[in-house]
Amino acid sequence: MAETFFSPCPRGLEALLAEELTSFGARAARAVHGGVSWEGDWDACRRANLESRLATRVLWRVGQGRYRAEVDIYKLAYSVTWAKWFTADDTIRIYVTAQKSPLKSLEFITLRVKDAVCDHFRTVAGRRPSVDTANPAVRIHLFLTADTATLYVDTTGEPLYKRGYKPAAVEAPLKENLAAGILRLTGWQADEALVDPMCGSGTFLIEAAQMALDIAPGLGRGFAFERLRIHDRGAWAALRRAAEQRRKPARVLPIFGSDVVGEWVRRSRMNLDAAGLADCVRLDRADVLERTPPAAAGVMVANPPYGVRIGEAEELLAFYPRLGDALKQRWGGWRCYLFSADPELPRHIGLKASRRTPLFNGALECRLFEYRMVAGSNRERAPSPQE
């Protein structure tokens, strides 16, 4: 029987996520603002959790109805058969988001949904679940439009970009699913050289290595659906076993990382080691303005530092032209991608971008700038009419 799901993702990656989910068995995948609605069986849901590199969660739709007032939402939430899926011993947390809802207080709506779930359990089981805002067993999501309320059970738990490794994060890290989406947008293939010359905590490097070795990103973690009463342990074990068997042995890959700050190189190395990929990626301490490419062609991808890592705004503005010069002088033959929220970057780098892809890092609007550098020339390639 087909169920209905919604998978949020970083904004700008919706179309890529729809393609990915379809490859897992999703049907009627439809990209909407901020995610993908889709239909599928529980096997597709399990696969999406285990194997999606782009989704943030997999939400299972359990109720939907029109509303005009808070009481309508209470009635909808009370009518859902919660006790079929978890018990009063399981802790819960309610999340409410709204777009154009006429209701004034989301906090009050959150309370009403909690009351409805607890009242449902009192009716059918004689006791109610407790609320745990830190580490709930069951996360219930309510999404409100102007006149429709939709209830979901979260099958994921901790967001999917938490892959189950990464003990040495740095400030303002790039989320893993956004990094994976950026790599997809570059068109990088596993046999191509890949360089991140400002590697920070190594997110691009780890995501690329997992792609190259066909490592399912969720193999190192658990999921909320495993705690539901309807969980099929046998089907889940078979799916995990198939993913393990598909995983390729670790080997040295044409993936290279560096950073001018030794501490970030050390943290990247720690994170690669935690992910079991320390021997797959080559790391060095190097200045992006001075390092040379490791091959005649390939993909360079970087999230250039904002003012925090370089210094004051004036110093950052001086850095961009030097970065543009370094790309022109050393990176001929490479496709270079810079991901930034800084509107000054395209104005000062001195290169003409062949493509600018809007993406969001959380609520922060960013751009992925593509620069195709011409081999044997100090000019970047001019964009073709199709671009």
Image (cartoon, helix red, strand yellow):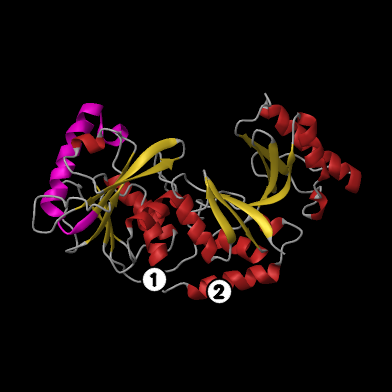
Neighbor class of circle 2 (other Cα within 10 Å; few <14, some 14-19, many 20+) is few
Quadrant housing residue 106: top right
- Point out the stretch of residues depicted in magenta: 307-335
Is 331 contained in the magenta span? yes
List the residue tagged with mark 1. Answer: 250
Residue drawn at (8%, 54%), measured in percent from left and top? 377
Badge 1 local density, few (<14 within 10 Å), some, or many (20+)? some
User: Is residue 95 visible in the rendered structure shown here?
Assistant: yes
Q: Nearer the viewer, mark 2 or mark 1?
A: 2
Secondary structure of the magenta portion, mostly?
helix
* On-image quarter of the N terminus: bottom right
The residue under label 2 is which amino acid type?
Ala
Q: Position of residue 364 (x, y in %)?
A: 42, 35
Viewer-side residue, 251 vs 33: 33
Mark earlier in primary sequence (2, 1): 2
According to the image, label 2 marks what residue?
242
Under circle 1, the secondary element is loop
* Vertical order, 14 against 27 (above or below): above
